[in-house]
Image (cartoon, helix red, strand yellow):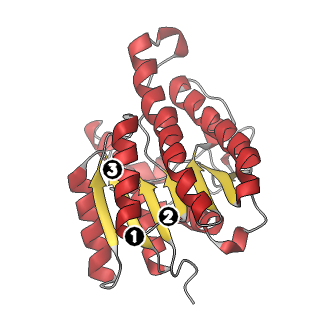
Amino acid sequence: MPRLQGKVALITGGGGGIGAATAMLFAEEGAGLALVDREGAAAEAAATAIRERFLSCDIMPMAADLSDEAQVTRAVDAASAHFGGLDILVNVAGIRVYGALADADAGSWESILAVNLMATVHCCKAAIPLLRSRGGGSIVNVSSVFGVAGRAGMGQYDVTKAAVVSLSRTMAIEEVGHGIRVNAVCPGPTITPFHIERAKARGVSEEELRRTGAQHTLMKRWAEPREVASTILFLACEESSFVTGTALVVDGGASAAVDGS
């Protein structure tokens, strides 16, 4: 039997990258899906791609600004009304800010905290009563390897991802009595349309990006979104029934390569 047969999952950032790959994999495993993305067209496109492969998949794409708690509540309530409940929440949505911490202003802090931390908080708060009513469930929050290891130039992003790890651990402690497991996934370099388009704007082709962009990993390559999605699937399904409160690093050995070799 598919690992998520009869389960309902809500995935944020479901319109592309890791979120869309997770949605496709969950569809393969039999889940009903609510895809929430700031860009409604992206969520619709991801849903269309899934329906083309899995005609029987019940999938509900939605547009929402996840930094707005009221919009989050409406999206979660709409998904629950459509599917009759919720079993799994996967928080993928995030944004990036580039620059040194010493140069960061209040506006950039407010915008990245609103999406990378508070959107996850809002989604968890809205989903937890539904998971409790089912007798339990799984929350998987996507952090980053740089939520547990530092670097220069993306400190604001990394701070928010460290906060997601801390949030996941504390929430796991608080919700274990309700049968809810909470874990974080910490991806390393993952090749997504975002990175490909950003490289293209700098005059770097996808081929060159793939060849040179992840040399700091032991495997000397980028992850494909599906490789991260597979880890999310493991934490979402019953195969990880004894796993909660952890941050699982999926980085091709980057965090083990102290000297980058």
Percent across and percent down for residue 206 are 35, 53
Which amino acid, mark 3? Asp
Left or right, residue 27 beside residue 78: right
Nearest to N terminus: mark 1 or mark 3 = 3
Find the distance from the CA under tag 1 to the CA under tag 3. 18 Å
Between disc 1 and disc 3, the foreground one is: 1
Q: Residue 23's quadrant in the figure?
A: bottom left
Please report the residue visible at 50 percent of the width from the left and 80 percent of the height from the top.
6
Residue wearing tag 1: 83
Q: Is residue 176 above or below residue 120?
A: below
Work out which quarter of the rendered image holds the C terminus and state it: top right
Percent across and percent down for residue 62 are 29, 55
Residue wearing tag 3: 37
Q: Which element carries disc 2, helix, strand or loop? A: loop
Q: Are marks 1 and 3 in contact (CB under 8 Å)?
A: no
Find the distance from the CA under tag 2 to the CA under tag 1. 7 Å
Residue wearing tag 2: 86
